[in-house]
Image (spheres, rainbow, N blue to C red):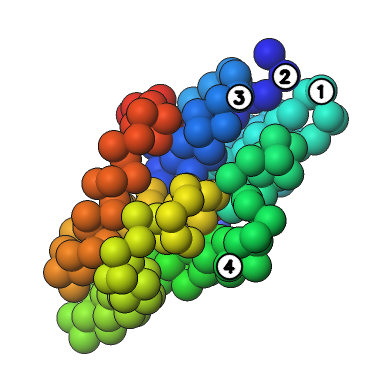
Amino acid sequence: MSLHLYAANTSNAQRASCALEEFGLPYTLHKLDLSKGEQKTAEFLAINPAGQVPALVDDAAGVKIAQSCAILLYLADKTGKLLPAAKKADVLRLVAYSASDVSGAIGAYIGFSMSKLADKPAPVGEWLAGRVATALGQANKALADGRPFIAGDEFTIADIALAPAARRAKDIPGVAELSHLQAYIARVFARPAMAKGLAALA
Ligand SMILES: N[C@@H](CCC(=O)N[C@@H](CS)C(=O)NCC(=O)O)C(=O)O
């Protein structure tokens, strides 16, 4: 098989597995155990020098690509799907928003919460949670107009960028209250391909 996905059960890697399922592309899954450092082997570092998942190898095209949202853009370009020309600027904006504002804020909150710092002042945790709620609040506000997907009526790669990260954030203070976002997450993962992408890494 030409496509190889290197992944673990994380929201960044779920973007890639969900995308491959949504695009209907067959792939070989290589699950890495991050707790055993399998992402730092010489073999994997030759694929992604950053030593992080996800990474995708497209043998037929001679391509190795990391960064979850870059993988979405690569596959949209390869297939010509889920990045409609009429919505291109908006979808690109929303993919970048998910990769930076949303995942950045979630990563900072989770990194702080899980850190072994001797002193973890509560106000810092609250401030970091506030950044997540502010970032996801933008999506919640957009979805309040009744649109089914984040860029409008059509499912796009912006949904594959946003939904796994938003799902990961559900227990962060302030996120459960974002009712339009919560309904959206349920709607997106009710799609068979999205559900299959999640299950593949579980
Ligand atoms: N911005 C990257 C983040 C990748 C990332 O942080 N991967 C984590 C799992 S979600 C990882 O591989 N961590 C293991 C490590 O850094 O050693 C993306 O979107 O792909």
Residue with the mark numbered 2: 2
Image x and y of residue 55, in percent: 62, 38
- Is there a contact, CB below 8 Å, between mark 4 and mark 2? no
- For disc 3, does the CB lie below 8 Å from ligand 1? no
Q: Looking at the image, tell me whether mark 2 or mark 3 is earlier in sequence order.
A: 2
Distance of label 3 from label 1 (alpha carbons): 13 Å
Tell me the element at label 4. helix
Query: Which residue is farthest right?
Result: 62
Residue with the mark numbered 4: 90
Residue with the mark numbered 3: 25
Q: Looking at the image, tell me whether mark 4 or mark 2 is earlier in sequence order.
A: 2
Q: Residue 176 carries which label?
A: none
Amino acid of disc 1: Ala
Distance of label 1 from label 4 (alpha carbons): 31 Å
- The mark closer to the camera, 1 or 4, is 4
Q: Looking at the image, tell me whether mark 3 or mark 1 is earlier in sequence order.
A: 3
Residue at (31% x, 75% y) in the render: 141
Amino acid of disc 3: Leu
Question: Residue 14's image quarter?
Answer: top left
- The mark closer to the camera, 4 or 3, is 4
Residue at (64% x, 40% y) in the render: 81
Residue with the mark numbered 1: 60
- For disc 4, does the CB lie below 8 Å from ligand 1? no
Tell me the element at label 1. helix
Image x and y of residue 159, in percent: 45, 52
